Image: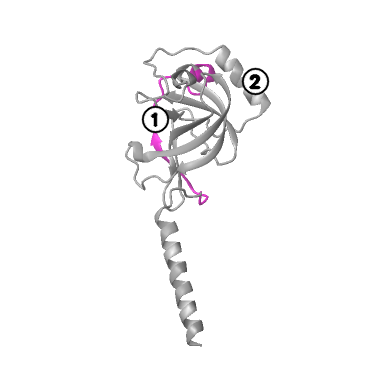
Amino acid sequence: MKKFRFNLLILLTLFCILFSLTSCGAKTVTWNGDTEYYAHISMVVDETNLYEYVGVVDYVFVGTVEKIVTNVIPDEPNGSDEDLSVYEIRVDENPKGEFTETVECSKHGGFKKDGTMMLIFSDKGADTGLPESGNQYIFLAYAQPDGSLTLSEFFDNRQYSDELLQEYLNYCNNEITFDRTRFTSNLDKSQASD
């Protein structure tokens, strides 16, 4: 009986240690069903006009979310890098720009520790959700001065379909270019070393 108690105690101790280690490193949270829009933004283009929106971004690509690196953001967003979720995305097609096979992209928004989804909104629209692991989407992205990528403010949870891709190809072919300082991602094929 003593041996059984001792083994049970060891087993419980190992379970507690394992549980505490897995809970310490939590980088992802799932949605609890409540949505809170946390940040109002003003766009320089009409975000409801996708010809303009595609013209302001640097890249449009079809990708499958392979991994959510992190999606936990502070309970009180402050407009910093801490408010970003990070996704590892396999690039399936490049309608605008050309990426290497896999890219890591950040996106404003994510989840508070209690599972409340935090998104952004503008005067003309609101983000409707976040990309989910395993799903394929058409993404719009901005290259940053340091070569990293930030996904667009809106539309990054529109699941891929052939019909939607044809729409985006039309937007890319007929985009209304916006004059702004442009950067090239270090994940762009033109930047990849041979």
Question: Which residue is labeled 2 in the image?
Answer: 166
Mark 1, secondary structure of its residue: loop
Q: Residue furthest bottom?
A: 1
Residue 153: give x, y in percent of width and height: 45, 30
Q: Indicate left or right for 40 with 167 as reference.
A: left
Residue 109: give x, y in percent of width and height: 43, 39
Q: Indicate left or right for 192 with 94 as reference.
A: left
Q: Residue furthest front?
A: 194
| Residue 41's disc number | 1
Camera-side residue: 63 or 102?
A: 102
User: Which residue occupies 47% across, 50% down?
Assistant: 29
Q: Which residues are magenta?
A: 31-54
Q: Amino acid at mark 1?
A: Ile
Count of labels shown?
Answer: 2
40 over 114 or under it: above or below: above
User: Which residue occupies 56% across, 22% down?
Assistant: 94
5 over 99 or under it: above or below: below
Q: Is residue 78 magenta?
A: no
User: Which residue occupies 46% across, 42% down?
Assistant: 69
Q: Amino acid at mark 2?
A: Gln
